[in-house]
Image (cartoon, rainbow, N blue to C red):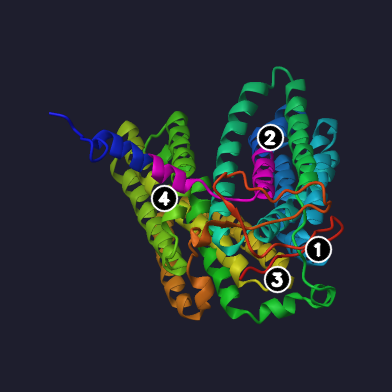
Amino acid sequence: MPLGNAAGPSYPQAALNAVSTYLKGLRPELPRPVWLLEAGGVANSLGNGIVVPFLVIYLNDVRGIGLGTSGLVVAVLLGIGIVGSPYAGRLVDRIGARTTLMGSLALLAAGYGGFPLVREPWHAFLFAAVAGAGNAGFAPSHSSLLAGLTSREQRTAAYAITRVTDNLGFGIGGLVGGLIATTQVPESFDVLFLVDAGTFLAFLGLLAFVPAPTQPDTSARVGGSYAELARDRTFLWLLVLTALLVAAAYAQIATMLPPYVKDHAGVSEAGIGLIFFVNTIVLVLAQLPLAKSLEGRNRLRALALAGVIFSGTCLAILLAGERFSGTTAVVILCGAIVVFSLGECLHGAVNNPLVADLAPPHLLGRYMALRTSAWQLGFLAGPALGSLLLARSPAGLWITAAVVCAVAAVGFLVLERHIPQEAAFTPSAKVGRKAFRVTWRTSEMRLDDPLSPSADAAPHQAPEASHAGEGRHRSA
């Protein structure tokens, strides 16, 4: 009996058509400059993955710098971001996101590219300070530039792709770095740092083809200040809840999960690696579909759901560590990390777009800078507090983390009443199927053609942009 007839396609064909339509619907319709920016992000995360996991090994085993001092070098590299990000945010608002990002990439290339020259501890601190200054400016300027090159309807997809490229690039970079570096050949680490510096320079080159968005008027840019931002109590509470969630969930999973499951569930290093590999795969596969599913939905409720998921994951980790061991524990932990990864996808799909929609155009850099600082503070405080709790009460660590995540979830629901209606919901990317349009500064060459062939140009075209300065386009 035939499965179809002349009146319509067969059932298998209909299923294939449905799958094809769904996959096409996941394809973000973004302008060409955004894809170039995302390509640069791939290079950046790949370089970080190549170097960051092996930095302490290089300093200690190759250059003979003590473990304690090597740890301080890494702390300087990462810690400067907390202090420097607010200054970078001010710079973004004054001179533009694109210009600030270019400066950050140059500092990162110089800092990491200088590590092969390290012979004394002070050399390492010097290059760490240079790279740290670049790191402080990267996230605020990159996030601001991405917001300025997209419409409200496109930002969820654009930031979702950034998370995918970050995770995929870092994971592949770590694999490549492990294949290149060996302490038996000290010069192999020089290759790591030079490749990393090359990725920053490659990103810098791509920015030559990314035009600057329109900018607010000069008086607004010069007159903006953090005092103005401090009056936005809703945003400040969002930062507090974000820092809590990062400290209790992201930081604990990244730093405290490995020693806990190794000591309490007998999970081997290979098992721990498998758990984090599953995390990366789920993030890469699920981020875009989940971002798509959030169109038209309340962002604060999505954040609350992420908090509930993180809370449940912490309890599942406790259960695995207390009741199971070996292979069984790994299977349970892999299941828990799948659920955790879905929570990450929810959180990642709404956090940056929400901040971009809350920020006035002339303060976008400052808003993004404090969002970056909230994440950095969470990752600084989380491991410090988590290690103390793990030493005194392993069960208490995961129970406390679960409670904090649940409190953050409730906080997001309370905050929902104070978020402006136009920012509280994720806009639909299907609105008119329009792509935000950016015009190149010359009449002969334009970068307004989206890479997605079905995308149309937006009716609100940005004026010709000068590479000397930039700001944020205010979407309707």
Query: Marks 2 and 3: which is nearer the front?
Result: 3
Point out the tag, 1 or 4, that comes first from the N-terminus. Answer: 1
Q: Are marks 4 and 3 in contact (CB under 8 Å)?
A: no
Q: Is residue 241 above or below residue 318?
A: below
- Camera-near label (2 vs 4) is 4
Mark 4, residue position: 342
Q: At label 1, which amino acid type do we have?
A: Leu
Q: Nearer the viewer, residue 193 or 378?
A: 193
Q: Which residue is mark 3?
A: 361
Q: Which residue is mark 2?
A: 51
The image quadrant that residue 220 belongs to is bottom right
When the figure is inspected, residue 461 is found, relative to residue 128, above or below; the finding is: below
338 displayed left or right of 354: left
Q: Which residue is mark 1?
A: 91
Query: How many residues crowd mark 3 within 10 Å: few (<14), some (14–19), many (20+)?
Result: many
For numbered disc 2, what is the local secondary structure? helix
Determine the residue located farthest toward the left in the rendered image.
1
First to last magenta residue range: 20-44
> x and y percent of residue 58 in the render?
72, 31
How far apart marks 4 and 3 lie (CA) works out to 31 Å
Q: Position of residue 102 (x, y in %)?
A: 80, 49
Q: CA distance from mark 1 to mark 3?
A: 14 Å
The quarter of the picture where residue 362 lies is bottom right
